Image: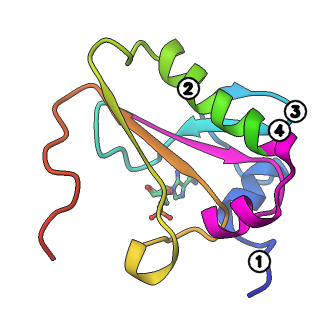
């Protein structure tokens, strides 16, 4: 499967559509989810063109991977979520329910999030 450069996060990275940025560096962009599922719901994406965690973990450089996961922790810290707690989640493919084919991690918090996986 090839990376689709018309996906919505690719358009955000190119500045073609707006986003509510909470963090940006050389490797990473983080912005508020447009349909928040919790009081705090942020998406963290690599700037590189990776389809999902499968692609990112197999093909991204060590620098990209470390920058990404350091950013996830740092963003959660900056959002004030460490003491109250938070969840990170990444969907891959159909069974994971992935809608946007550009790797992203959800950071959710601000309330009790309940069961990790709802019964199907
Ligand atoms: P996933 O199901 O893991 O692929 O999640 C995709 C997420 O992207 C969903 O939570 C959407 O609400 C979110 N989303 C879609 N379009 C946008 C957008 N333009 N700006 C911010 N979040 C978006």
Name the quarter where the C terminus is drawn: bottom left
How far apart in space, not on screen, are marks 4 and 3 (Cα)? Answer: 4 Å
- Residue drawn at x 51%, y 78% is 93
Q: Are marks 2 and 1 in contact (CB under 8 Å)?
A: no
Q: CA distance from mark 1 to mark 4?
A: 19 Å
Q: Earlier in the sequence, mark 4 or mark 2?
A: 4
**Residue 55 has which mark?**
none
Residue position marked by numbered label 3 in the rendering: 26
Residue 4 disc label: 1
Magenta stretch, residue numbers: 41-64
Q: Which mark is residue 73?
A: 2
Query: Disc 4 versus disc 2: distance between alpha carbons?
Result: 15 Å
Q: List x then y, in percent, for residue 100.
A: 57, 68
Q: Position of residue 48 (x, y in %)?
A: 84, 54
Residue 47 is inside the magenta segment: yes
Question: Helix, strand, or loop for circle 4?
Answer: loop
Q: Which quadrant of the figure contains the N terminus?
A: bottom right
Badge 1 density bin: few <14, some 14–19, many ≥20, Cα 10 Å: some
Label 1 and label 3: CA atoms lie apart by: 22 Å
Residue drawn at x 22%, y 52% is: 116
């Amino acid at each position: 499967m090839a990376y689709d450069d018309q996906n919505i996060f690719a358009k955000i990275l190119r500045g073609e559509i707006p986003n509510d940025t909470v963090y940006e560096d050389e490797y990473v962009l983080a912005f508020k989810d447009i349909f928040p599922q919790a009081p705090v719901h942020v998406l963290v994406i690599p700037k590189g063109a990776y389809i999902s965690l499968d692609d990112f973990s197999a093909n991204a450089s060590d620098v990209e991977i470390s920058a990404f996961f350091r950013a996830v922790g740092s963003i959660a810290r900056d959002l004030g979520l460490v003491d109250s707690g938070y969840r990170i989640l990444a969907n891959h493919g159909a069974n994971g329910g992935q809608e946007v084919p550009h790797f992203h991690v959800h950071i959710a918090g601000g309330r009790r999030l309940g069961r990790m996986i709802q019964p199907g």
